Image: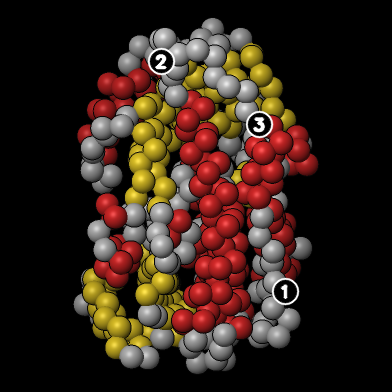
Amino acid sequence: MSGIEVLVAGAGIAGPALAHWLRRRGAEVTVVERTPGLRPGGQAVDARGVSKEIIKRMGLDAAVRAACTDTAGAYTVDVDGNVLETYRADDDGGDGYISEIEILRGDLAQVLYDDTKDGVEYLFGDRIAELTQDGDVVDVTFAGGEKRRFDLVIGADGLHSSVRSMVFGPREQFIRHLGLVLAFYTVPNEFGLDRWLIDYQDSGRSAGLRPVKDATRAIAMLSFPAADFDVDHRDVEAQKRVLRERMAGFGWQTQRILDHLDDTPDFYLDQVAQVVMDRWSSGRVGLLGDAAYSSSPMSGGGTGLALVGAYLLAGELAAADWDPEAGFAAYEELMRPFVEANQEIGRMHVTSLEAPAPDAGSPPEPDMEALMALVQRAINGVELPDYAGVPDSGPSITSAATQ
């Protein structure tokens, strides 16, 4: 073992993925998560391009694929449910609008947790209350009262990262709202959904239904434009009221979807936002995933950024013999172009949903060559070092057995 002790804040996707690679590189890892356990369900997330290679290197390809939603494709429909366009999961080599590896966020988190729980210390129902950097260590006080010291602290605690606020400044400095609000929640599958996602869009709003493995359930997806949205991200009842108001009279199956708001087990609503920072580290504290560079759900690349970022961050720190300045700098240099491409995709997607002004002419034809080049950079635009000279204990026995 290297003797390096690392504290990771957040047990979503980025945190456990980083824990996997840090443990393989020889570090002792603790993951702290404010919720009492893993959060189930959530929206479907995708692994495309280079992120599929990361999953293979983790030894988790079979486990991840076994937990996939098995979505066959997607239909866009009109208000009467007539199909307008069809997208299949095998389009573009499995890296298209519906990717071949599509998995509920909670299911991917479970796979990553199951892979790491035997070699990583998890602290659920707690959080970092204070941290102070003192030379070669970071002194951490947990909300539960315990005080401990770590060599490195990594904030992988999402868009509303408390680690980022503690070390880098108020969230308003870094969050860029894109003028759209998204909601996801589980509903009974009373809509006849059968492996096909259905999406209805009109005048900047959208309503959709996504199939999951359990054919008795579906994931509802609603969005509406809101440049002035100002509701606490923890005030669920206020969020539901706003959602009802903004989606009223939308048509298609929207009212039936809204009828299940009060009985859903996993409601989520938030602004579509990106995190833009000049640097992702300060001393011995670094950031990963949405905490550092959220590309928004509209990019389709957030999971890939978390998985690729975890691989590179652990690898570069170990390659730099755990020197934070060198390791963080190398990680950022490799990741930033990949992040910027995915963030651009997210902004373009939101813009494409905007309702045209009444007096607007026809939009200009997109430069398809430039667009496809951008998409490729967002999917495969980072070179993965093999870290041949860096310690690697290999995949866990459990994950290796699933291959």
Q: Position of residue 321 (x, y in %)?
A: 56, 89
Q: Is residue 114 left or right of residue 174?
A: right
The front one of 264 and 72 is 72
Observer able to see residue 299: no
Q: Is residue 46 left or right of residue 354?
A: right
Q: Quadrant of residue 145?
A: bottom left
Residue type for callout 3: Asp
Q: State which quarter of the image contains the C terminus.
A: bottom right
- In the image, residue 305 above or below residue 274: below
Q: Position of residue 381 (x, y in %)?
A: 66, 55
- In the image, residue 324 above or below residue 380: below
Q: Quadrant of residue 261?
A: top left
Q: CA distance from mark 3 to mark 2?
A: 22 Å
SS at circle 3: loop
Q: Which residue is mark 3?
A: 367
- In the image, residue 45 above or below residue 110: above
Q: Position of residue 303 (x, y in %)?
A: 55, 52
Identify the residue at image location x=25%, y=59%.
Answer: 170
Q: Which residue is mark 1?
A: 386
Q: Earlier in the sequence, mark 2 or mark 1?
A: 2
Residue type for callout 2: Ala
Q: Which residue is mark 2?
A: 357
